[in-house]
Image: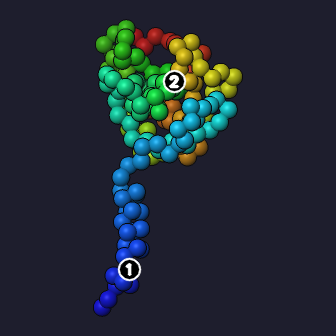
Amino acid sequence: MENASDNVAPGQAFIKLILAVMFAVPATFSVSADNNVYASGATSKVSVVLQKCATGTRQACVVDGDTIWLNGQKIRVADIDTPEVSEPKCSSELAAGKRATDRMLELLNEGSFELKGWPGRDTDHYGRRLRVLIRDGRSLGDILVSEGLARTWSGRREPWC
């Protein structure tokens, strides 16, 4: 018996191939290249495959559990604080920081998410953009907090050792 999908015109076959590739290959960015894409007053939807940051140009990577780079912009996850990995005060902080970093990377790569501005402040004193990362109405930071990998941001850093 002949399948209806076997009778596809050459133009339709090409379109089907393009659509199949679009859905099979991970997207890079689904946001505009505008430098204000992560403006504090806007909510930007992002679909990106991230990796851990390494040396060189940082376009889309995770620094640690509460800092990422997107489209060449450094972003501080504003609603949480995670243990440090770059300058930990003790070995337990480093170990916890690595777990938080790995989990944030995992969460970000599970699908698209939104960046929402932090009320009242656009950047921190390091120049990082302050944003809350949201998927399906829930903060990704809150997920880390619920898993014991982060603290809700209190306005200042607290020791992890």
**Which is more toward the observer, 10 or 36?**
10
Q: Which mark is residue 76?
A: 2
Residue 59 located left or right of residue 155: left
Residue at image point 38% right, 49% down: 26
Residue 17 located left or right of residue 142: left
Distance between the alpha carbons at the discs numbered 1 and 2: 49 Å
**Earlier sequence position, callout 1 versus callout 2:** 1
**Whether residue 125 is situated above or below residue 34 in the rendered picture:** above
Q: Can you give x and y, in whole percent of width and height, for residue 16 in the image?
A: 39, 68
Q: Can you give x and y, in whole percent of width and height, for residue 151 in the image?
A: 50, 23
Camera-nearest label, 1 or 2? 1
Q: Can I make out residue 38 in this image?
A: no
Q: Quadrant of residue 130?
A: top right
Residue at image point 50% right, 36% down: 140
Residue at image point 41% right, 74% down: 12
Amino acid type, residue under disc 1 in the picture: Val
Q: Element type at marker 1?
A: loop
Q: Element type at marker 2?
A: strand
Q: Which mark is residue 8?
A: 1
Image quadrant holding the N terminus, namely bottom left
Residue at image point 54% right, 35% down: 133
